[in-house]
Amino acid sequence: MSSPSSDSGTIAHVHYFGGTALSGPATVTFDGGRIVRVTPDDSGDVPPGAVDGSGLTLLPGLIDAHVHLDGRKNLEDAAHWGITTMLGMGTPSPDLVAKLRGLPGLTDIRSSESPASAPGGMQTTAMGFDPATAVATSDDAEPFVAARVAEGADYLKIIVEDPDVMGAAALDVERATALVEAAHARDLLVYAHVTTVPAVRIAVDAGVDVLTHVPLDAVLDDGLVESIVADGQVSVPTLVMMRGAVRFARSRTHGAEVDFRNAELSVAAMDRANVPILVGTDSNAAPGAPLQVAHGESLHDELELLVAAGMAPLDALRGATVMPARHLGLGDRGSIEAGRRADLVLIDGDPLADISATKNIRGVWIAGERVR
Ligand SMILES: [Zn+2]
C-alpha cells in the first residue's frame, strides 16, 4: 500500500451525497489524498483503473463525534465500517493517543485527553483517570486546560453531573464556567458530558459548545431547548449508549424515572428546534466501562436510533458528515467536493430513503487510500 499512487483513484458513474441530496451520476477523482474533481457523467465508459459506481451511492467518510480509544483495533474496526474520523472523549493514556494519530490507512482521530471532573467523580474513581487531574476549585481550571494542551488535546471535555445526586463529586457552574473560559482562551471547543436535566442546565449556563449524551431522567423542557438554541450549542446524543445505559443509570440516580423514551423525546425536541445533532456512539472497549459499545458498526446503529427518534434520514446522515465538519473544526472533510479529504464510503442503496443502507458497504477510502 506504499506505492506513490495509493492515495489516488477514480469512482465513475456514481450517485453521491452532496450534503442536502443525492446528486449524479458523476465521476469523483482524487489524488494526493484529496478530491480533485466531481464531474457529471451520465454516460460513457468506465476509465481504465476506475471503480464502477453504477447503481451505487458514494458518501463522505463518516465521522463519529464521541468515542473512547484504547488501541489500534478501534481504528481498524472503525475503518472497516466506513468511519474515517473519530473524536476521542477521554483515554487515560496520552501516549497511547499519540501513537494512534495520523496512521496511514486507518481512521483519523482527535482527542480531548483526560476529561475534567470534580474530585471523587466517576472518571477518577472508576474509569482510570489520574485523581490528581480533578478540578477542585475554579483556580484549577487554567492549569488543567494548560496540561491537556501540553498533552496534545484538540478540545476540552468536562464531566457535568447533577449536584443533587452526586454532591461534591459534581462540578458546579462556577468551575464549569472557569473551565470553559480557560478552554476558549486557547481556542478549544468544550464538550460537556451530561446525562441528567440538571447537568444540562449547568452546562448550558457555563457556555459549553457541545452537549454529549442526552438525559434519561426527564425530557428537556422548552425553556432549556430555547437556551440551547440561543447559545448555539450542538448535541451529540449517543443514543446507542443511552439505550444500554438505562439499567446502569437506574442503579445510581433517580430509579424509576430513568427511561430511554426520555432520551428519544429530547432528541426530537432539539431536532424540531433546529439544534444541530451530531452522530456519536460513546464506543469503547474498556473493561471497567459500564457498557461496551463496538467501534464502527455502532455508528450505523446510532443513525437508525436517531431516525427512530424522529429525525429525517437526511438530517441523521448530515449529522455524521456535513455537521461535524462544520461544528467541530473539521472543515477539510465531511463532504464530496474538490479540495476535501478523499474520505469516502461506497454503499449499495439510498440512505435518504432507508438509513440502514449505510451498512451495505462496497468500499472505503481514507485520505484516498482504499482500505476496504
Ligand atoms: Zn464517553
Image (spheres, rainbow, N blue to C red):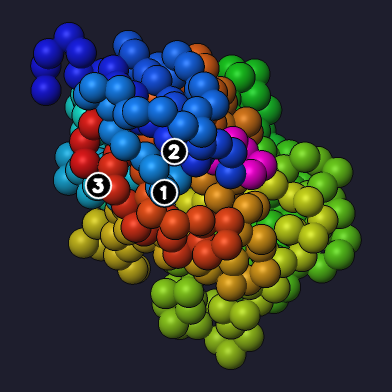
Give, as a single range, the part of the protein colored magenta. 17-21
Q: Is residue 100 above or below residue 193?
A: above
Dot 3 or dot 2: first in sequence order is 2
Dot 1 or dot 3: first in sequence order is 1
Q: Position of residue 363 (x, y in %)?
A: 28, 42
- Label 1 close to label 3 by CB (< 8 Å): no
Q: Quadrant of residue 307?
A: bottom right
Q: Please name the residue that numbered disc 3 is placed on.
A: 80
Q: Position of residue 266 (x, y in %)?
A: 70, 67
Viewer-proximal residue among 259 and 353: 353
Residue 55 numbered mark, or none: 1
Q: Residues within 10 Å of mark 2 (few under 14, many from 20)?
A: many
Q: Tell me if residue 20 is in the magenta stretch.
A: yes
Query: Could you tell me which quadrant the C terminus lies in?
Result: top left
Q: Please name the residue that numbered disc 2 is placed on.
A: 14
Marks 1 and 3 sit apart, C-alpha to C-alpha, by: 21 Å
Q: Position of residue 129 (x, y in %)?
A: 33, 46
Mark 2 belongs to which amino acid?
A: Val
Mark 1 belongs to which amino acid?
A: Gly
Tag 2 secondary structure: strand
Viewer-proximal residue among 73 and 177: 73
